[in-house]
Image (spheres, rainbow, N blue to C red):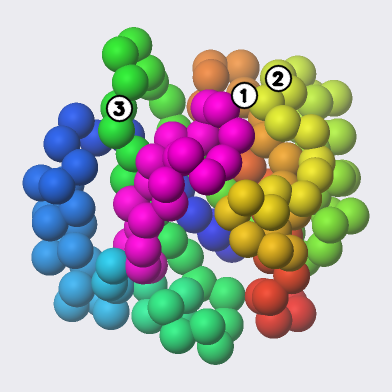
C-alpha cells in the first residue's frame, strides 16, 4: 500500500487549492503542514492532503504532501507502508543490495511523529523511496 507521495510544485497555494478541489469528491481534505524548521536539514516544508481513512484515523490511509520544487529537481518521492520496523529494515537492505543509494538508514523519525520509523533509498534514476512503519497504524 502507498502511504504517501511528495509532489514538487512551483506554486504551493495554487497547487494546494487545485488538489483540495480535485480530490474533495473522493473524500480527501487538508491534513496539515510540516514546518521544516522543526526537523533535520534537507527535509522541506510540506503541505498535506489526505484521504478520508487517513483523516479519520480508523485505518491505514494515504496522503499527498506538496513541497516547493527546487531548481534542477526531478523525480518522484513515494512512501510505502511496512507492517513492522523489521519490514522497513528488510526493504531498505534489499533496495541497497539491488543498487539503490542510501538516503537515510532505518531509524526513528520522531521529528515527524513518535512511532514513525523509516528508511530512504534513491533508485537508479534518482526517484526516492521511503519505507515507513507508523506504530499507530492498525495491524495489517
Q: Kindly report which numbered mark, 3 or 1, lies closer to the viewer in this rendering.
A: 3
Which residue is nearer to you in this view: 100 or 109?
Answer: 109
* Mark 2 closeness class: few <14, some 14–19, many ≥20 residues within 10 Å: some
Which residue is nearer to you in this view: 98 or 92?
Answer: 92
Q: CA distance from mark 3 to mark 1?
A: 19 Å
Compared to residue 78, the image places residue 43 above or below, namely above
**Circle 2/circle 1 CB separation < 8 Å:** yes
Considering every residue shown, the one lying at the far top of the view is 72
Q: Which residue is mark 3?
A: 69
Q: Is residue 20 visible?
A: yes
- Residue 52: image x %, image y %? 38, 80
Compared to residue 21, the image places residue 118 above or below, namely above
SS at mark 1 in the image: loop
- Residue 45 part of the magenta segment: yes
- Residue 38 part of the magenta segment: yes
Residue occupying the point 70% across, 63% down: 114
- Residue 26: image x %, image y %? 25, 76
Q: Which of the two discs, 2 and 1, labels the residue nearer the N terminus?
A: 2
Residue occupying the point 38% across, 20% down: 74
- Residue 31 is marked as none
Q: Which of the two discs, 3 and 2, labels the residue nearer the N terminus?
A: 3
Residue occupying the point 43% across, 51% down: 34
Q: Kindly report which numbered mark, 2 or 1, lies closer to the viewer in this rendering.
A: 2
Extent of the magenta region? 31-50
Q: Which residue is mark 2?
A: 101
Residue occupying the point 73% across, 77% down: 140
Q: Which of the two discs, 3 and 1, labels the residue nearer the N terminus?
A: 3
- Residue 123 is marked as 1
Q: Is residue 112 left or right of residue 12?
A: right
Amino acid at each position: 500500500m502507498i502511504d504517501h507521495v511528495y509532489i514538487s510544485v512551483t506554486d504551493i497555494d495554487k497547487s494546494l487549492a487545485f488538489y483540495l478541489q480535485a480530490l474533495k469528491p473522493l473524500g480527501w481534505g487538508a491534513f496539515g503542514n510540516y514546518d521544516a524548521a522543526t526537523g533535520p536539514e534537507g527535509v522541506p516544508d510540506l503541505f498535506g492532503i489526505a484521504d478520508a481513512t487517513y483523516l479519520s484515523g480508523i485505518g491505514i490511509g494515504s496522503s499527498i504532501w506538496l513541497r516547493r520544487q527546487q531548481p534542477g529537481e526531478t523525480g518522484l518521492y513515494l512512501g510505502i507502508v511496512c507492517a513492522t520496523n523489521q519490514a522497513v529494515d528488510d526493504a531498505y537492505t534489499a533496495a541497497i543490495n539491488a543498487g539503490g543509494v542510501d538516503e537515510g538508514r532505518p531509524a526513528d523519525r520522531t521529528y515527524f511523529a513518535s512511532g514513525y520509523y523509516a528508511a530512504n533509498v534513491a533508485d537508479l534514476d534518482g526517484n526516492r523511496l521511503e519505507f515507513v512503519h507508523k506504530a499507530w497504524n492498525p495491524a495489517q
